[in-house]
Amino acid sequence: GENVEQHPSTLSVQEGDSAVIKCTYSDSASNYFPWYKQELGKRPQLIIDIRSNVGEKKDQRIAVTLNKTAKHFSLHITETQPEDSAVYFCAAKAGGTSYGKLTFGQGTILTVHP
Amino acid sequence: SAVISQKPSRDICQRGTSLTIQCQVDSQVTMMFWYRQQPGQSLTLIATANQGSEATYESGFVIDKFPISRPNLTFSTLTVSNMSPEDSSIYLCSAEGGRGTAFFGQGTRLTVV
């Protein structure tokens, strides 16, 4: 089955700096890669996603890049703010018989210091 | 995006008892998913629930322990049976909205004493 590795497990930055979180996946059939933000005690919220036919996607301060050949994808947050502090999860979804099933990375605790 | 209402939001249960968690989606969805998230950990898929068929369980999870119902396209329940303290966790339901994106219920924080 799919295996998703996420790094780093914790990331501490100063307000205004950029943050980058990286994930690798194992199943070359995976074709959808969402990122979720989870604040303490809250549900995971989708913040951005990318499909395998696209190399990069941007939404204001957040961007995601995908390298299908290397089977890795990354989340980039620019101009970080204290409210960006949360746990971030990457995930991968395959087609075929695993349609709909998401496999999550281990999560990254992002702390943005004012 | 789909809106998912999950209840209860939290519960404290005695060991040996069972708890049923409910999820209601505001639109019809083909697939619903149940996850477990232990404190400080990632989300682990328990099972996939399709309407009209038996749920598909992931390795390490069995139907006798986590029976699931999916009576229609907007509703599902997960029961945690014969609970032990090791079952203390957050349980989350999920459904696919448009474009195949997944949305989550608010979670059920279960404590078994």
Image (tube, rainbow, N blue to C red):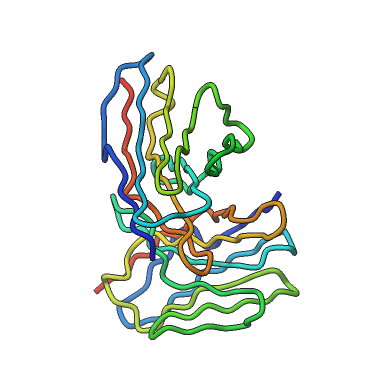
Residue A15: horizontal and vertical position, in percent?
30, 78
Q: Residue at position x 42%, y 46% from top? A: B93
Residue found at the far top of this picture: B16
On screen, residue A108 above or below A71: above
Q: Quadrant of residue B88?
A: top left
Residue A63: horizontal and vertical position, in percent?
48, 81
Q: Residue at position x 45%, y 62% from top? A: B97
Residue B75: horizontal and vertical position, in percent?
40, 43
In the image, A72 versus B27, the foreground residue is B27
Residue found at the far left of this picture: A114
In the image, B65 versus A87, the foreground residue is B65
In the image, B101 versus B90, the foreground residue is B101
**Quadrant assignment for the N terminus of chain B:** bottom left
Q: Residue at position x 42%, y 27% from top? A: B80
On screen, residue A86 above or below A106: below
Residue B79: horizontal and vertical position, in percent?
42, 28
Q: Quadrant of residue A18?
A: bottom left
Indicate left or right for B102 with B13 as reference.
right
Q: Quadrant of residue B104?
A: bottom left
Q: How many marks?
A: 0
On screen, residue B21 above or below A29: above
